[in-house]
Image (cartoon, helix red, strand yellow):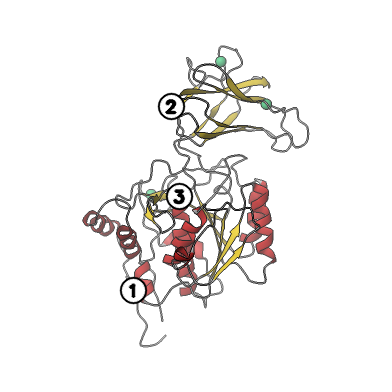
Amino acid sequence: MGDEDQVIGSKGTTIAEIGRALAESETGPDAQSFSRMMELTGISALHDRNITGKGITIALLDSQFYYDNETAEKLTSDLVPIYNGSYRKYEVHGIACAELISEIAPDVKLYLVDAGGTEKDVTNAIERLMKLDEHIDIVSCSSDFPFGRFDGEDELCKAVEKMTSNGTLWINAAGNQALCHWSGEFKDPDGNGFNNFSPEDESINLTLEKGKVVGFWLSWEDDWDSASLDYDLRLDYPNRGYSISDNPQKGYRDQKPAETIQLLAPEDGTYQIKIRRYDAPDAPVRFHLFTTQDLDEYQVQNSSIGILGCCRNVITVGAINLSTLDIQSYSSRGPTKDGRQKPDLVAPDNVTTFSYISDAFAGTSASAPYVAGCAALIMEIFNDEPDLDTRKVLIESATDLGPPGPDNIYGYGLVNLSSLEVNR
Ligand SMILES: [Ca+2]
Ligand SMILES: [Ca+2]
Ligand SMILES: [Ca+2]
């Protein structure tokens, strides 16, 4: 400690200050409001102190890494692709995440890890990362799966824990399913085999346009490896016809308590989602239904986070409006199935990136890399403290939002580094 010791933003940016400053700035998604947010959350001040993520490694798990030379200029220069060739050309989701990380922590070493589209692909990506000579400090993942136990005990969580117990900080997007999720217990007072979402109503309506690609994932409380409660998922079309997912659940090995429908909507109109009891005793069973489309009714915002976001030791990140600091309506909410509070933090979305040049990058997918970049800055600041608990620093320095104290909408609040002391 010498004469140059400095404390920056020692009292931190208060919520009132952030609110005032944002009210003065232009509303809407633009590069300017993103840089304003970087100022308000202490990132720009850390850059001024030459804290830029030096010596920190981040692995970005995604499946869409297309970029051209012009976009490359927006990325950290220390970029290591680990592709398995499955990623789709011209899809930029992962590169937009990489841009945000590069903006917040421009000197990190960034691994672009092709994590495919299935749980197995993610597990394989983790195995590859564990085999690297280099230790990965942070994983940033902006994808998730709508199927499972949601209690931190899913197979994927065991893979994630291999990394987190090895000292890697895993940061995951909470998901954008708050308005396209239903959860409830099976009820059939009229005994016709179809669940009653209300006493008079056996279907959830959903409006689709012809040609829309849509997915439905239903899962329920049962033995995840050998399910014996047999329920089915059915989707009635607006006029005639329907799709049904009727996997057997007879207690055999590898039978999951889950049904899924994916389709190209054959016509415009109102579709009806139904749950049928095929072969199960008349006892209360809790269901989760996720779709890719907002439900017209019976939305259940609570517990709409996917299985990765529910893993223990993962930092789960929701999305807030860049200007108002309000939660985005779609940002998935906690708690987990076993009652743990989620998400952990929130960060802005709807930001401008080069990859999505004509559109804002919306959703919690943009919020997770914001926090990953912040985590890298914290790790650089405290790099001589071997027992540094970055998760704790992130949480304790966050600015509380919404209901006072930690909650299942905003977690501990907005990630905010403006109260961190830099002694150098
Ligand atoms: Ca019924
Ligand atoms: Ca079934
Ligand atoms: Ca709160």
Counting other residues with Cα less than 10 Å from the Cα at mark 1, is it few (<14), some (14-19), or many (20 or more)? some
* Residue under label 1: 8
Q: Earlier in the sequence, mark 2 or mark 3?
A: 2
* Residue under label 3: 364
Residue at 43% over, 27% down: 297
Q: Locate the N terminus and report the quarter of the image it occupies.
A: bottom left
Task: Give how far apart the Cα atoms at labels 1 and 2 are.
Answer: 48 Å
Which residue extends farthest right?
A: 252
Q: Is residue 44 left or right of residue 355?
A: left
Q: Earlier in the sequence, mark 1 or mark 3?
A: 1
Q: Is residue 229 left or right of residue 295?
A: right
Counting other residues with Cα less than 10 Å from the Cα at mark 2, is it few (<14), some (14-19), or many (20 or more)? some
Residue type, numbered disc 2: Glu
Residue 277 is situated, as x and y percent measured from the top left of the image, at 64, 21
Residue 403 is situated, as x and y percent measured from the top left of the image, at 36, 46
Q: Is residue 299 left or right of residue 137?
A: left
Residue type, numbered disc 3: Thr
Is the CB of mark 1 within 8 Å of ligand 3? no
- Evaluate whether residue 26 shows in this view: yes
Which residue extends farthest left?
A: 24
Task: Give how far apart the Cα atoms at labels 1 and 3 are.
Answer: 29 Å
Is the CB of mark 3 within 8 Å of ligand 3? no
Residue at 34% over, 47% down: 326
> Of helix, strand and loop, which one carries label 3?
helix
Residue type, numbered disc 1: Ile
> Of helix, strand and loop, which one carries label 2?
loop
- Evaluate whether residue 405 shows in this view: no
